Amino acid sequence: MSKRGAMSDIEKSPRGVYEKNPGSGTWYIRFADEFGKTIRRKIGPKEAAIEAVKRMRERVAILKLEKDFPSPKTLDEVMAFVAETSRLKPKTKKLHETYRRTWNRAFPKILIKDIMPVMLKQWVTTRQKEPTYRGTPPTVSTINRELAYLKMVFNKAKRHGWCDTNPVTRVDFFRENNTDDRYLTEEEMKEVLAKMEPDDAVLVEIAAQTGMRQSEQFELRREDVDLKMGLIRLPDPKAGKKQWVELTDRALELLTAVLDGHDSEWVFPSPAPRHRGRHLNGRYFSE
């Protein structure tokens, strides 16, 4: 191999990824930890090494942030620390922001070490009567998620020595009853769809035919639908990997009609003028 060719291969390798013995197929990574010490590790294939060095640099960045972060005292300061040092997907980050606002309303400017189990139990009683933005009381699953978020916050605070105990462990979570779930029969589905507006009925029937979650359905792009093969690719499934879903004949018929009716990049574009160019969101059905 010429010197120019060797230099080309080196340039293609990301910073911190190298092959100790050229041509061996065994790749190493090199990075600096949160204290500035150089760390070298044997990984294996080049793709795995690229992913490993990226992951370690992200982890070091978080550790540096934690090391330099001022020691928090109030609950809100600890929640701010969690927000700054956590790697979250946008949807999870948005949920955490909602939970943070909920707990700030409940315990404004209170020291985290002063929060006791009895205070949280009283909060649960009060929270059950508070109306949500829809005007209805929160579900038990919502309260459970809010408590679970706070439990995670206290676990991080305890690990850093900012509190001695986790009071959320002394609070009983609600039992969520999922045993009553059942599927609609074909006749029941027809009755439901007959009572809906045509456009809404199409959305609901596609969901029923494909089993997609609402976010997966509304965030579907035109490029994710293969009408010739009768497949759709889920953009961000819960498993974190791309998945292909086979379409039923009815789902294929419905999606073909939907895509023929507009030229948007989204399969389900928002009809609202102020949201032109965006996809539908969960509030479409909130009314």
Image: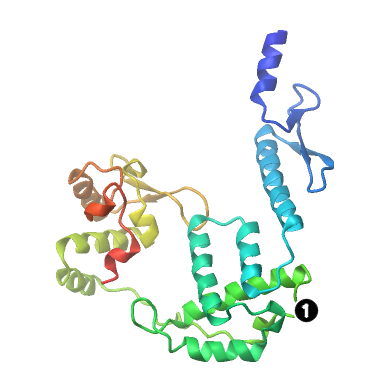
Where residue 24 appears, x then y in whole percent? 77, 25
Location of residue 206 (image quadrant): bottom left
Identify the residue at image location x=34%, y=64%: 282
Work out which residue is located at the far front of the displayed protein and give it: 109
Work out which residue is located at the far right of the displayed protein and give it: 37
Residue in front for this viewpoint, 122 or 207 = 122
On the question of residue 1 being in view, the answer is no
Q: 12 above or below 186?
A: above
Q: 84 above or below 242?
A: below
Q: Is residue 287 left or right of residue 29?
A: left
Location of the C terminus (image quadrant): bottom left
Where residue 1 appears, x then y in whole percent? 71, 10
Identify the residue at image location x=70%, y=83%: 114
Residue in front for this viewpoint, 172 or 211 = 172
Q: Is residue 98 left or right of residue 3?
A: left
Identify the residue at image location x=55%, y=87%: 123
Identify the residue at image location x=70%, y=40%: 53
Q: 188 above or below 10?
A: below
Where residue 96 appears, x then y in whole percent? 53, 66
Q: Is residue 139 left or right of residue 114?
A: left
Q: Is residue 265 left or right of residue 77?
A: left
- For the residue labelled by badge 1, is the local secondary structure a helix, a strand or a loop? loop
Location of residue 45 (image quadrant): top right
On the question of residue 36 being in view, the answer is yes
Mark 1 Cα within 10 Å, few/some/many (few <14, many 20+)? some
Where residue 97 appears, x then y in whole percent? 51, 66
Image label count: 1
Q: How is the image coloured?
A: rainbow
Which residue is the site of mark 1?
Answer: 164
Q: 216 above or below 50?
A: below
Amino acid found under the numbered disc labelled 1: Asp
Residue in front for this viewpoint, 21 or 267 = 267
